Image: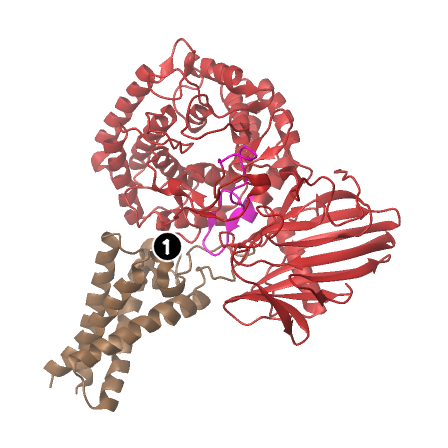
Chain colours: A red, B brown
């Protein structure tokens, strides 16, 4: 239960300069976009109309002028949150001296009746006593860069900016008033009272004004849809609550119009508060593909797995046979990076949209793609002749590329280097190409060449990427720095999991990069100033690595600690400050949740061997 | 003007249009694959989808040629440049309405801007001017349709 210190205003005292701690955020979504909701009832981020669009609520990056939507008591309150069981509908219960009210936040599924193309419902139910409430909608389209006009259509408050519009429907929530830059109202809850404030959006089409009955129907439909989806997931192993919660987060990050999976729902949340390590994660990274495919298959999401594979195959076609590290959610290859003139989360600038990492050479992506194809084919997915030929051409390219330096999985902005993880993934690409050829999925004409180059790549790794001094695979060839990403080699099948080198590497990485249950990504330079927190996915990789080398008891202990690091509603960010426990980086981070699912299932499997 | 010439022109025009689009795909100018898009409306089997899609595409190409034929007949002329103008209009219509709006609405496996978490789309929607399939898709599609219209007109001229 999260306890918020009390304040007789809409702004919680936990906020600093208007910014809530990142761990205070939950997320809701509809498969097209995601809203980020603070535990004081404020929606501080909502990209509109799609997850990778500019924001209409951007207080997360500009607390004064970014825009937000707040529903909260006007008297001091304590708060408790959870997701309604089996759903991503967020319940925030406000307890005050005069009574208790609960706020239900959901982004509506479209449903059978005519509705807006996007709809956000905020429903306030009286539980006991009376609670004075206020709601405020301050939309700022175009990430606050486009002028937003407020007015009324048929008496209904409406905010517009060019081809975008939001109507605010309020039922039993007081009279909707319009001030200079906000639409707002006040009301008081009573036992069994039920108010609704709905934001009904349109993009390049006329607004739809739903009735209260329509809103109720869609809310019921939304609850039922989420429960139905989760009921059909199959996972009976340990840490089930955390795994199923992560499954829901993953589903929220699936961009339904295309099947792509976003790395996170936000942009430019800092890896160091006040620092420059602020990136836009609203793209699909090939790096995450194998984890995504594996998680979807393990959770029984066959349809989502197929859609994701189809998307991956289509998106990479324009750049074939080369792969970009990331692609847009609509499958586009251009992700031009620019900065926005906004203050950033707690002064963390620049605020970036787009991601220049799209132009980097990252050799690990080839291994991720071939591993994804391998997992998909192994699960009975159909890879047709055309796709087989394309994958073979990619394997041919890896034969030519693997000796080159690259930017690595962490997308360093320093000079390219021979990253060990990249080499391991190149080995993986060639090994999986050989296996797929052996199964008749890929044409076998170049099989011998792939096998020969895989052996050469492995020889390079074994002779130049292992340090007997550090007793570990190193960050780069001939280097002495350590990097937690090498653990992915172990997780994906780089030989030999029970050999002395992997045992030593797991111990060295834990000792040198670890801090309690936390793990830093690497030691050494990356071309950026400042530092960062511990990388949550790496901790889960370590837990899985421990299981893979047969130390399941240690893996279980670590996992028990890691599942407690989520916030009160089970969300993980990208990083965590080991000293304060504060979240850092974009959220919810798909890679953190994917790594959790992967580690939980792997530990379960190893424990039952 | 002969209706048979229009049909033959439609077939030849579709052949050229399909070849141009396919070549553009190989040249990494676009990911647009019309036969694949059409075929996956019928089956999720990628190989079978392409075979069916080619057949459907040729039928549609011939049907559109009949539309061109009717317009030429109404205007009383069928100059090659008029065919090119029809082709350009056809290309713009295809990019803005036909493929962008109508196809996602009837395609059972294609996402739309309204697709939500209750649906699983196997195909990404084309977007305005089919730019989701690559920024050059619009210009490639326009050029291919101009060629198509020109070929239909030329066939009618040659058959005179």
- The front one of A399 and B120 is A399
| Image quadrant where one finds the N terminus of chain A | top right
Asked if residue A270 lies in the magenta stretch, the reply is yes
Q: Is A510 drawn above or below residue A112 in the view shown?
A: above
Q: Secondary structure at mark 1?
A: loop
Q: Residue at x 57, y 22 (%)?
A: A555
Give the percent coordinates (x, y) of residue A308.
44, 47
Mark 1 belongs to which subunit? B
A401 left or right, relative to A65: left
Question: The C terminus of chain A appears in which quarter of the rendering?
Answer: top right
Of helix, strand and loop, which mostly describes the magenta segment?
Answer: loop
Q: Is residue A89 visible?
A: no
Q: Is residue B95 above or below residue A487?
A: below
Task: Please state the extent of the stretch shown in magenta in the rendering.
Answer: A250-277
On screen, residue A113 versus residue A127, left or right, reads left
Name the one closer to the observer, A213 or A17: A17
Residues packed near mark 1 inside 10 Å, few (<14), some (14 to 19) or many (20 plus): few
Q: Position of residue A302 (x, y in %)?
A: 49, 46
Does residue A148 appear in this view?
yes
Q: Is residue A343 on the magenta stretch?
A: no
- Residue at image location 24% in from the left, 77% down from the top: B85
Towards the viewer: A55 or A432:
A55
In the rendered image, which residue does mark 1 sit on?
B45
Residue A185 horizontal side relative to residue B99, left or right: right
Q: Residue at x 25, y 27 (%)?
A: A453
Going 40% across and 29% down the picture, which residue do you hit? A527
Query: Residue A178 at x, y = what percent?
Result: 69, 66
In the rendered image, residue A31, in percent from the top left (x then y), is placed at 55, 53
Query: For residue B95, what is the image quadrant?
Result: bottom left
């Amino acid at each position: 239960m999260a306890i918020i210190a009390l304040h007789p205003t809409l702004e919680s005292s936990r906020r600093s300069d208007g910014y809530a701690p990142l761990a205070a955020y939950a997320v809701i979504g509809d498969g097209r976009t995601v809203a980020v909701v603070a535990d004081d009832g404020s929606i501080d981020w909502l990209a509109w109309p799609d997850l990778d669009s500019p924001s209409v609520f951007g207080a997360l990056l500009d607390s004064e002028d970014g825009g937000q939507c707040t529903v909260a008591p006007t008297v001091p309150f304590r708060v408790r949150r959870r997701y309604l069981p089996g759903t991503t509908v967020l319940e925030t219960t406000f307890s005050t001296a005069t009574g208790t009210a609960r706020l239900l936040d959901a982004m509506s599924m479209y449903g059978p009746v005519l509705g807006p193309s996007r709809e956000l419902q905020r429903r306030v139910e009286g539980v006991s006593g009376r609670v004075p409430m206020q709601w405020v909608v301050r939309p700022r389209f175009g990430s606050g860069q486009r002028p937003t006009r407020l007015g009324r259509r048929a008496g209904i408050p409406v905010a517009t900016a060019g081809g975008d519009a939001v109507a605010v429907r309020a039922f039993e929530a007081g009279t909707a008033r319009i001030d200079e830059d906000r639409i707002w109202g006040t009301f008081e809850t009573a036992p069994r009272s039920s108010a609704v404030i709905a934001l009904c959006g349109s993009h390049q089409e006329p607004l739809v004004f739903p009735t209260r009955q329509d809103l109720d129907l869609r809310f019921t439909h939304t609850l039922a849809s989420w429960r139905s989806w989760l009921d059909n997931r199959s996972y009976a192993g340990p840490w089930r609550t955390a795994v199923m919660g992560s499954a829901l987060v993953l589903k929220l990050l699936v961009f339904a119009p295309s099947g792509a999976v976003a790395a996170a729902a936000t942009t430019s949340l800092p890896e160091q508060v006040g620092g420059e390590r602020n990136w836009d994660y609203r793209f699909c990274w090939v790096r995450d593909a194998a984890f995504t495919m594996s998680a979807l298959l393990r959770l029984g999401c066959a349809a989502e797995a197929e859609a994701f594979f189809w998307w991956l195959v289509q998106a990479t076609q324009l750049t074939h046979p080369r792969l970009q590290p990331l692609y847009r959610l609509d499958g586009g290859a251009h992700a031009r990076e620019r900065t926005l003139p906004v203050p950033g989360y707690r002064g963390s600038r620049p605020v970036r949209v787009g991601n220049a990492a799209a132009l980097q050479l990252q050799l690990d992506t080839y291994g991720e793609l071939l591993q994804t194809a391998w997992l998909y084919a192994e699960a009975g997915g159909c890879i047709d002749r055309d796709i087989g030929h394309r994958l073979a051409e990619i394997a041919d390219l890896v034969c030519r590329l693997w000796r080159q330096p690259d930017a690595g999985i962490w997308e360093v902005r320093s000079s390219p280097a021979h990253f060990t993880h990249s080499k391991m993934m190149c080995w993986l690409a060639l090994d999986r190409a050989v296996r797929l050829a052996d199964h008749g999925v890929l044409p076998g004409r170049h099989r011998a060449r792939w096998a020969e180059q895989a052996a050469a790549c492995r020889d390079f790794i074994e002779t130049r990427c292992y340090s007997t001094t550090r007793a570990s695979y190193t960050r780069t060839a001939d280097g002495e720095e350590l990097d937690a990403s090498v653990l992915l080699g172990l997780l994906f099948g780089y030989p030999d999991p029970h050999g002395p080198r992997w045992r030593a590497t797991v111990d060295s990485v834990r000792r040198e990069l670890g801090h309690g249950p936390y793990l830093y990504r690497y030691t050494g330079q990356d071309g950026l100033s400042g530092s960062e927190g511990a990388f949550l996915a790496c901790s889960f990789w370590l837990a899985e690595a421990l299981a893979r080398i047969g130390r399941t008891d240690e893996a279980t202990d670590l996992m028990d600690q890691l599942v407690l690091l989520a916030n009160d509603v089970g969300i993980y960010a990208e990083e965590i400050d080991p000293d304060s426990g504060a979240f850092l980086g974009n959220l919810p981070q798909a890679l953190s949740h994917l790594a959790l699912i992967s580690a939980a299932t792997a530990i379960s499997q190893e424990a039952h061997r | 003007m002969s209706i048979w010439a229009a049909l033959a022109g439609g077939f030849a025009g579709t052949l050229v249009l399909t070849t141009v689009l396919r070549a553009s795909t190989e040249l990494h100018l676009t990911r647009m694959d019309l036969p694949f898009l059409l075929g996956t409306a019928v089956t999720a089997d990628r190989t079978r989808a392409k075979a069916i899609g080619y057949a459907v595409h040729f039928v549609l190409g011939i049907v559109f040629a009949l539309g061109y034929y009717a317009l030429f007949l109404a205007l009383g002329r069928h100059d090659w440049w008029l065919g090119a103008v029809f082709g350009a209009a056809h290309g713009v219509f295809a990019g803005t309405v036909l493929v962008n709006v109508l196809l996602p609405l009837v395609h059972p496996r294609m996402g739309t801007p309204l697709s939500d978490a209750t649906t699983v789309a196997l195909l990404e929607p084309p977007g305005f001017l089919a730019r989701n399939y690559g920024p050059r898709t619009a210009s490639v599609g326009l050029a291919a349709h101009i060629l198509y219209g020109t070929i239909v007109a030329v066939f009618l001229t040659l058959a005179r």
